[in-house]
Image (tube, rainbow, N blue to C red):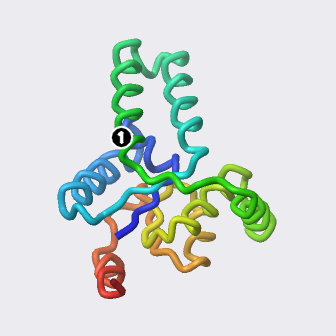
Amino acid sequence: MIIFLDTSAWIKSYIEEDGSAEVQNFMSDKSSQNRENKFVASAVTYAEMIATFKRGLKGGRLTEDEYNRIILDFKNKWDDFYIPEVDHEHIEQSGKYAEKYALKGCDAFQLSSAIVSHANIFVCSDNDLINAAKDNGFIAWNPINGEFAKTAEKSVLKEK
């Protein structure tokens, strides 16, 4: 199973907010459950995650020690994620998705990355992006809305 994590979802595994426990449990379960599960992220996610961590530090949400621990853990996990190659077609497709779905630029690039990676599941905490992902055939899950639908996951497994 190929699982795409948008920044808005992945950040929840590091910074406590609505849906954090769900993302942490989901990632832990999918990592240990099956070595064939592959996590995917967009190239833009790296900068978005680092920027969010730094804003957390500057805003007092994270201590210096927490920030340093989180950065180290994130960079180690980043190496385990598949990051689709960015090419001219990928960039142009993201522009088409931005126009078609009225998405923010980085969100359109996230969607394009998920499509390029042939992900089965799209995990995100932005409803506009979730709807665009569903429109493109993904099983999409917003961790703020609670448990991942087991029936949807079973349908992905049957397709394999």
- Residue extending furthest left? 33
Question: Looking at the picture, how far across and down is residue 47, in whole percent?
Answer: 58, 35
Instruction: Write down the quadrant of residue 29 in the picture.
Output: bottom left
Which residue position holds label 1? Answer: 77
Q: In this view, does 140 lie above or below 72?
A: below
* Quarter of the figure with the C terminus: bottom left
Q: Residue at x 63, y 70 (%)?
A: 132
Task: Locate residue 150 relative to residue 145 in the image: left or right.
Answer: left
Task: Locate residue 98 relative to residue 127 in the image: left or right.
Answer: right
Question: Looking at the picture, how far across and down is residue 27, in whole percent?
Answer: 30, 53
Q: In this view, does 35 lie above or below 19?
A: below
Q: Residue at x 18, y 56 (%)?
A: 32
Q: How many marks?
A: 1
- Kind of residue at badge 1: Lys
SS at badge 1: helix
Q: Is residue 72 above or below residue 147?
A: above
* Quarter of the figure with the N terminus: bottom left
